[in-house]
Amino acid sequence: MSVITVERKILQKNDEITADIRSKLQSKNIFSLNLLSSPGSGKTTILEKTLEFLQGKISVGVVEGDVQTDNDARRIAKYGIPVVQIVTNGGCHLEAKLVADALENLDLDQIRLLFIENVGNLVCPASYDLGEDKKVVIVSTTEGDDKPVKYPKMFRVAQLCIINKMDLLPYLDFDVERFKENAAKINPDLQFFEVSAKTKQGIEEWVKWVVEQVD
Ligand SMILES: Nc1nc2c(ncn2[C@@H]2O[C@H](COP(=O)(O)OP(=O)(O)OP(=O)(O)O)[C@@H](O)[C@H]2O)c(=O)[nH]1
Ligand SMILES: [Mg+2]
């Protein structure tokens, strides 16, 4: 009983900070995306390829979330864009307070598009809004096409779904149509992109969608 009460309070506090982040980003006219997936589905690699396409077009900022290391922030920094690494020290998701602190370290007047790469985890991050405009769930073909029904909350809260590692399809049992059907059972409004961050297949279409949101 008391555990449930504490959990509700934590989420309530998160929602309060989320509202502050949302109004701050709106006042600066910044469009923001929260990238969510299991560990290793390709969040950072998709981000890297996206930044290649966006270079010189839109000013981007990135908040990286990881349990340990600043590896991902270093990968993103190579593109010469502002990036802040949050290390959760064991925490399995980003919370609004952490993102609010990270945003203090970015010059929001210089950014039109903000990516937040969440901690790799298909469960906990689904419960924490971060003040983002949209949530993007990324699933790679190596994970199996039943993930939407096994981890429904993530697919319920997301607006977009990127299916990554399409280049590996010939070696796997992953059925793209079955995956989409499973996802549609949870969230009929989910919009899909099929990409390979490795070969860049589908990245241009995804980037086009991103640019349209910012314009
Ligand atoms: N074959 C193939 N490999 C990929 C693709 N995208 C990413 N990878 C590989 O998958 C591994 C994990 O990619 P990351 O981009 O680091 O994954 P992530 O989701 O950011 O991982 P975490 O931040 O640790 O949760 C790396 O070895 C990538 O090179 C793809 O489209 N095809
Ligand atoms: Mg990563």
Image: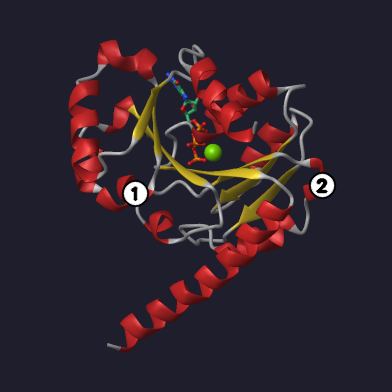
Q: Which residue is mark 1?
A: 154
Q: Earlier in the sequence, mark 2 or mark 1?
A: 2
Q: Residue 174: tell me if it is visible.
A: no
Residue 2, numbered label = none
* Residue 153, position as x, y percentages in the image: 30, 53
Compared to 87, does 206 lie above or below? above
Residue type indicated by callout 1: Met
Residue type indicated by callout 2: Asp
Q: Residue at 55% across / 72% down in the picture?
A: 16
Nearest the eye: 213 or 53: 213
Compared to 31, does 139 lie above or below? above
Compared to 39, does 88 lie above or below? below
* Residue 21, position as x, y percentages in the image: 63, 61
Disc 2/disc 1 C-alpha distance (Å): 31 Å
Element at badge 1? helix
Q: Is residue 2 left or right of residue 25?
A: left
Q: Which residue is mark 2?
A: 109
Figure quadrant of residue 194: top left
Q: Residue at 52% across / 26% down in the picture?
A: 209
Element at badge 2? helix
* Residue 67, position as x, y percentages in the image: 54, 54
Q: Quadrant of the N terminus?
A: bottom left
Q: Quadrant of the C terminus?
A: top right
Q: Is residue 27 left or right of residue 91?
A: right
